[in-house]
Image: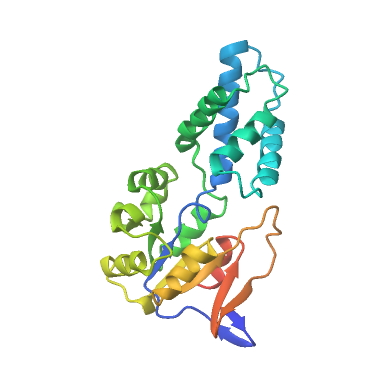
């Protein structure tokens, strides 16, 4: 329970907590970084053999800096940003920089990502505690098999069984459309008043859930955030939306 304008504020009468997966529970950035470094190590070793002196973290940081700089250009598409950033990052390495070679390297990074799936450090413990009081489920855009594999790989399957996973593929509707939320609640035998959506996307998770009549909590993760940072309250009209910066902070509400 937290205080809103001096009065106690809590989610009462709730039966189920719906979570977004990527960016809320699963750290996509950490997964990509680990896959990036493994692929680069593999490619350099394959062609040149010497990888001992390679600073993989430094190369990834360079890629990330280039990507952040280039993604602002509206004329560039997603893969074009990745390829141009990758070319700049590996320009000082003994590797080709042709489009064909970089596309192969980028595809290898993508292929390796599922093997490097990682939770945010606070996610598992928070869900373990919450699962003792609520049913937990996931509403996620993306292929069902891929999302289910992430749930199994991270150990979340003991809190979220397969029939508690609702995806844009299984429901034939994607967030933020209200249909996917309504379908998930119906299949979980829960009303909107009994449900809360927890996610990191304001548009897809929060606005979508509100359209379906649910309450929501926005997980607004901030890089290098102070774990003691206080919660916030945003509003849509008169509707308060709690804002937390980690899954651990959810425990003060539930």
> Residue 36: x, y in percent?
58, 32
The image's colouring method is: rainbow
The residue at the point 44 percent across, 69 percent down is: 208
Where residue 128 sits, quadrant-wise, is bottom left
Q: Is residue 120 above or below residue 212?
A: above
The residue at the point 55 percent across, 22 percent down is: 101
Q: Is residue 4 above or below residue 90?
A: below
> Residue 18: x, y in percent?
41, 64
Q: In the current view of this chain or complex, which residue is farthest to the front?
A: 75
> Residue 10: x, y in percent?
51, 80
Residue toward you, 124 or 19? 19
The tally of labels here is 0
Residue toward you, 246 or 127? 246
> Residue 31: x, y in percent?
54, 40
The residue at the point 57 percent across, 85 percent down is: 8
* Residue 163 visible in the snapshot: no
* Residue 69 visible in the snapshot: yes
Side of 134 where 93 appears, left or right: right
The residue at the point 32 percent across, 58 percent down is: 164
């Amino acid at each position: 329970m937290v205080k809103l304008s001096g009065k106690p504020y809590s989610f009462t009468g709730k039966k189920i907590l719906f979570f977004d997966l990527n960016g809320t529970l699963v750290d996509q950035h950490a997964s990509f970084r680990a896959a990036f470094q493994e692929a680069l190590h593999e490619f350099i070793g394959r062609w040149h053999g010497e990888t001992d002196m390679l600073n993989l973290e430094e190369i990834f940081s360079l890629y990330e800096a280039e990507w952040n700089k280039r993604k602002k250009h509206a004329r560039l598409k997603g893969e074009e940003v990745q390829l141009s950033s990758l070319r700049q990052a590996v320009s000082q390495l003994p590797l080709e920089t042709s489009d064909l070679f970089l596309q192969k390297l980028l595809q290898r990074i993508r292929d390796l990502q599922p093997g490097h799936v990682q939770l945010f450090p606070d996610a598992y413990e928070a869900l373990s505690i919450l699962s003792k009081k609520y049913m937990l489920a996931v509403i996620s855009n993306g292929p069902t098999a891929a999302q289910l594999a992430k749930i199994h790989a991270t150990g979340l399957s003991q809190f979220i069984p397969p029939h508690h996973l609702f995806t844009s593929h299984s429901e034939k509707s994607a967030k933020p459309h209200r249909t996917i939320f309504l379908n998930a609640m119906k299949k979980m035998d829960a009303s909107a008043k009994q449900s809360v959506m927890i996610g990191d996307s304001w548009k897809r998770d929060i606005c979508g859930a509100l359209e379906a009549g649910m309450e929501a909590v926005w997980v607004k993760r901030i890089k290098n955030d102070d774990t003691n940072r206080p919660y916030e309250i945003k509003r849509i009209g008169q509707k308060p939306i709690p804002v937390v910066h980690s899954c651990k902070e959810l425990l003060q509400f539930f």
